[in-house]
Structure formats: structure tokens, C-alpha cells
Amino acid sequence: MEPSESPRNFGVEPRIAALYLDYLQHHDLQKLFEQVHRYYELPTLYRVCYSQHVNARRAAAHVLGFIGDYDANPHLGKLLRDSDRSVQLLAENSIKNVWTRFGTEQERRELRNIMRMINKQEYSEAIRLANIVLENSMFFAEVRNQRAIALFAIGDFQNAAEDASIVLDLNPYHFGAAVGMGHSYLQMGNKELAAACFRQALRINPCLETVRRHLSQIEQQNFG
């Protein structure tokens, strides 16, 4: 580990930047993981997220998607608004993985089952299992988010929006919940609330170009 690497250590480019450049050249992900594990612990990687060196931030944003725990969520959430587009996109991919790493191993297995059911369009079964998990782990935001997805799919837009709102209370970086809530309000005919949700999603993650187009269309319809 390199304890000197902190948000204020701006002079020398962190070692992880060189490791990442080597990965981009040789595409050896296993080697990258081994080298990062050799020199870094997770708290140090979290600090690297605030480095002034763009390749260090890119490396942290990429690697944390594979090895970061739920504590990585606020750090990746901040990188969604990074000045570098690559950092933003890497953070967007990684943070979705981190959202699934809350709770116990059993609860995470149940989440994977819920997600498989949704992929198979078994929405009622997904909702039933999510209800069971949430009885014991009401703060597991991603389980609630998946229930919102399933509720939306069966046309229960009001409860889908309510679930998405709670997800955002639990995890203020969950742009997916903000988007889902916006679409729920659109289905209920409330364009004003839908637009507010889409704006919230873009404040969290400015890279959501489809959401930006949806918002522009709503604004044109309302004020054009």
C-alpha cells in the first residue's frame, strides 16, 4: 500500500496510473488486479478517486467496479461528475456493480435471483422474493430498485415511483432510480414530476444522454 497517496498528493503520479496504462496496452486484467492488490488496499483506492492525475482516477474507477465493496459507492458517485469523460463512463459502469454488494452473502444471492427473474419477465415472482428480502433488509437499496423495475413492468407505476423514491433516500447516487421514477410519472401523466426526476438523474450522472433527450422533449411540449 502507498499511504502517501491522498487527495493532496498532487506532485508525483500515483503508481496505479502506470499500472492502468500497462493494462490498456496489454489487456491483462488479471495482472492489473494482482498489481493493485499488491500495492493498494481499498481505503487507499478510495483516496485515489480524488487524485489530480486523470489516469489514476480512471484506474480507480475501473478497478473498483471489480473489487470495491459498497463503501466505494460515494467515491464512484462523485466520479460520475468528473471533468474527464472516460472517468465518468468507467464510474457509471462500476457503480452499478457496487450497488449489488450491500447486505449479507445470502441477501446478495437473493438479489441475483430477483434480477434473473426480471430478465426472464417473471415479475410477480421477483416482487414476491423482493418483499421477503426487504422484510429483513429494508435498507438494501438495490433490492428495492429491482422491485420498482418489476412493479413498473406490471403497470403498478405508483408503487414503482414510491420504491424508487425510497431508493434515492437510501442511495443518493442511484441515478437509475431517478430515471425509473421519471418514467413512472410519465406513465401516470405527470410530466412536471417526470421532468424533475430526470433533472435529478442528470445532476447525479450528467452522462445520461437519453434522459437528457427525454427531458428536452418534455420541456418542449410544456413550454414550446
Image (cartoon, rainbow, N blue to C red):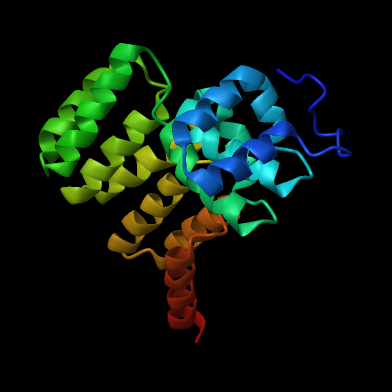
Q: Is residue 71 left or right of residue 165?
A: right
Residue placed furthest toward the front: 26
Q: Residue 48 or 168: which is nearer the viewer? A: 48
Where residue 187 sits in the image (x, y, percent)?
Answer: 28, 61
Query: Is residue 27 left or right of 72 when viewed as pictured?
Result: left
- In the rendered image, the quadrant that contains the N terminus is top right
Q: Is residue 220 left or right of residue 113?
A: right
Query: Residue at coordinates 85% horizontally, 37% vertically from top-left?
Result: 12
Above/below status of 83 relative to 50: below
- Which residue of the protein is positioned furthest toward the bottom in this rendering? 224
Image point (18%, 40%), residue name: 118
Residue for point 42% across, 66% down = 210
Q: Position of residue 209 (x, y in %)?
A: 48, 66
Toward which corner of the image does residue 126 lie, by quadrant? Answer: top left
Q: Residue at x 45, y 59 (%)?
A: 193
Residue 24 in the image: above or below residue 97: below
Q: Residue 53: percent from the left, percent from the top? A: 76, 45
Residue 166 shows up from this direction: no
Residue 168, given in percent of the width and then of the height, sits at 48, 39
Front residue of 174 and 13: 13
The outermost residue toward the right is 11
